[in-house]
Amino acid sequence: MVMPLILIMLFFPFCTSLDTLTADQSFKDGQSLISSKNNFALGFFSPGNSSYRYLGIWFVKVAKQTIVWVANRNDPIIDSSGVLSINQYGNLVLHDSSNRLLWSTNVSVQGTTSSVAQLQDSGNLVLVQGNNKKVIWQSFDHPTDTQLPRMRLGFNRITGLDRFLTSWKSQDDPGTGDYFHKLISTGSPQVVLYKGSTLYWRSGPWPWPRPTSPSSATLSSRFNYDIFYNEDEVSCSYFFDDPSIISNSRLVLDNSGLLQHLLWNDVDLQWKEFWSKPKSPCDNYGHCGAYGKCSPESDNSFNKFECTCLPGYEPKSRKNWYDRDGSEGCVRKQLGLSMCGNGEGFVKVERLKGPDSLNAVWMDKSLSSSECEQACLRNCSCTAFVSVNIDGNGTRCLAWYGELIDITENSFQKWDLYVRVDATELATYTRKSNGFLGHKRQLAITIISVMVTLFLVCLIAYICLTKKKRKTKVKRKLHNQSLYFTGTKGYLEGNELEESSRHPDLLIFDLGCIVAATANFSPINKLGQGGFGSVFKGQLSNGQQVAVKRLSNSSGQGIEEFKNEVMLIAKLQHRNLVKLFGCCIQGEEKMLIYEYMPNKSLNYFIFDHTRSSLLNWGKRFEIIIGIARGILYLHQDSRLIIIHRDLKTSNVLLDGEMNPKISDFGTARIFKGDQIQDKTTRVIGTYGYMSPEYVIFGKFSTKSDVFSFGVILLEIISGKKNNSSYQTHPSLTLIGHVWELWREDRALDIVDSSIIESFVSHEVLRCIQIGLLCVQEDAADRPTMFAILLMLSCETTLPSPKQPAFIFRRPTNDLGSVTGKEFYSINDVTLTMFEAR
């Protein structure tokens, strides 16, 4: 008896599972970490029929091995030689038998205190430091295809971290797949599903009700979610009131694009569906097009089409509608009848999932339903609103400005949407709600509506004629005011520039106000100068600091470019785009008033030997991510596709915290519908940043901006301009120099000397490779901005870049080559067009 007892005591420490890994330990294939309450395990596994090995986390109390997180999802181990350890820098690292680094936490560890990795009972693998157990990295911030209870998905505004789910490639391959599940914060937060860059499902806008499941009514009452919606973060997580459900609940995005909330059933020994999307045609994004609504109950009905139009709208294509295709959506019945101060109102459409909230805005304060209606009615661009009680904290108003799309009735959200309709349609719905009215009364209402309409049209015409005559007098009265509000329509002296009432916050500044703010455009307040003119710092009477862009008379940017910039920027709202406060036109003066950016532009830092040291690699990488997010918003997340056409380091401004903001939209162009490319005979931009198809053929697309982003990316890394000279190869551009070094496996030689001590080699190499992918000669080979952000955010395998464009510098006597002068934003180039005979 003694000997067996001794053997048990000796063997016991080796078979005891631990939940921590310290700096003096290593972790090999065949071993595992088990959380303290036996909820989750960390170890090596092979998925499906694959023989490759991966480091991952799975449920312990679930009979069928179910993986919830994978470390080296795109870098498998070919055998069982994987070793997990903590290196001398305090990071978790994964190596194979060849000592090849497959995965790392890759965080900056402060001080000399060693790090400790711990697997928590929530399924979160954390890396902590010091006696206070400060978390410096966690797997919850880097999810794969699964969200666990209390795991947040969304965007951290402070760190720039965007947490979202990505599907596996297949059941046998956990590599990054085609489907993405993420939280979109624009407008009112909503969760979405993408296949590549195509949005194909979304939830309704926040706030969301508790989901219900007929098969799990008890669990539904315990389900809840948290929303973090503030200046620091926009994210969401789910949880159950019963803590025991943590160990058998998961939200997973599978490789087919199905998003499922699953619960483990110990009786049946299988995962049971609690909730899933998409399920029916009505779940497909925009299934019934703009101003159409989808009825899931009609999905399986042969005789009834699931799509109907909102009140006041009719099918855009009756033929397609008859053929049961509603993708083109609906249009207003009375296109010629104004819905601005013309007797219009709102019709309630019940029990809906709210429309896409990309162009929706929350009112600033609590409003009753009637107050919300009046506020929306006063703004002619407000197309619909809902009045929602948020967590018992009062009623808030969410209003839409623009088209209404992706609306489904009888969904779990069940909002009452109030849709704006014209006076005729309003009278029709009022009649229906009040019961049958006699023919004479109907006729009287129609006649009155028409007469009121004609009267208002005549009145508006009269006001416009008299207002034009009185405008000079009115302007003199306003001259002594520092600024004034334009209302729904503002007419600017010199040119009648009508500002959309969708943006009532855009101000028209009086010239006297700008002169006073800039001390009569004093040279002391001059911030810079370009082809457009000069930029001055100013301070308004209320203390607000602004930047005044004053177009010179010789500027190539005329009134069309000026109007273009005003209308575009007024409609764009993103943290990485410069904010426009207002404008001023008086006589020959044309000015734009922006938010003041105290740290000037990006080129002010990266091309200066002294100032470049202020931007270490970490800050430069944040700037790269910020620029990419801003361009992605222009290309994809704004309602219209916007091509900037003049992206360069001098058009990337830096705020007080060195956050980048894209500026100068005077040459931007809008793409509508499914347009993907356009052509011009007037090439506008800056040499060194323009794509080859644009310079040579005048063709531009989103891939033109991608090319410019690639140049900016390489300039940020190298601290050199694309048109710099190199002693060894004076004819090479920066692109050509990087390409030569890349082919010789010496790409890191290009890194700016001021960040040598701070850069992370594999991050920089990845960014250089992304930059080369962006500047490839063929536009079709360049990635989209969505793909670029994924490449920057995820450790995915990147394709090999092909030869870039503009490797060699043009001779000094070529077109546009001016010694000692910088090319500005407006350059007219004569193009010779070749046509076949």
Image (cartoon, grey):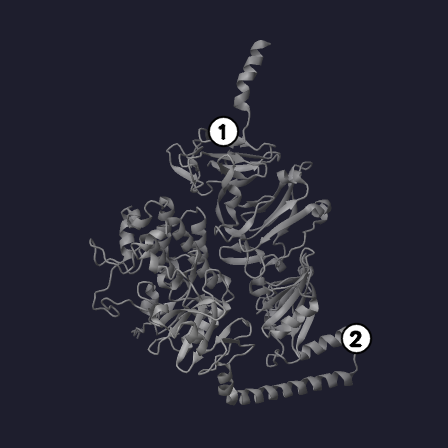
Which label is found at residue 30? 1
Residue 335 in picture, x, y percent from top left: 59, 79
Residue in front for this viewpoint, 93 or 309: 93
Residue drawn where x is 53% and y is 37% of the image: 57
Q: From where the camera sits, is residue 272 visible?
A: yes
Disc 1 vs disc 2: Cβ atoms closer than 8 Å?
no
Residue 652 sits in which quadrant? bottom left
Which label is found at residue 435? 2
- Looking at the picture, which amino acid does disc 1 mark? Gly
Residue in front for this viewpoint, 788 or 610: 610
Quadrant (top left, top right, bottom left, bottom right) of the N terminus: top right
Q: Earlier in the sequence, mark 1 or mark 2?
A: 1
Which label is found at residue 705? none
- Looking at the picture, which amino acid does disc 2 mark? Gly
Q: Considering the numbered disc 1 on the image, is that residue within a helix, a strand or a loop?
A: loop
Residue 113 in picture, x, y percent from top left: 44, 34
Q: Considering the numbered disc 2 on the image, is that residue within a helix, a strand or a loop?
A: loop
Counting other residues with Cα less than 10 Å from the Cα at mark 2, is it few (<14), some (14-19), or many (20 or more)? few
Counting other residues with Cα less than 10 Å from the Cα at mark 1, is it few (<14), some (14-19), or many (20 or more)? few
Q: From where the camera sits, is residue 48 visible?
A: no
Q: Is the residue 71 above or below the residue 623 in the image?
A: above
Residue 362 sits in which quadrant? bottom right
Q: Is residue 354 left or right of residue 565?
A: right
Q: CA distance from mark 1 to mark 2?
A: 76 Å
Residue drawn where x is 61% and y is 54% of the image: 278
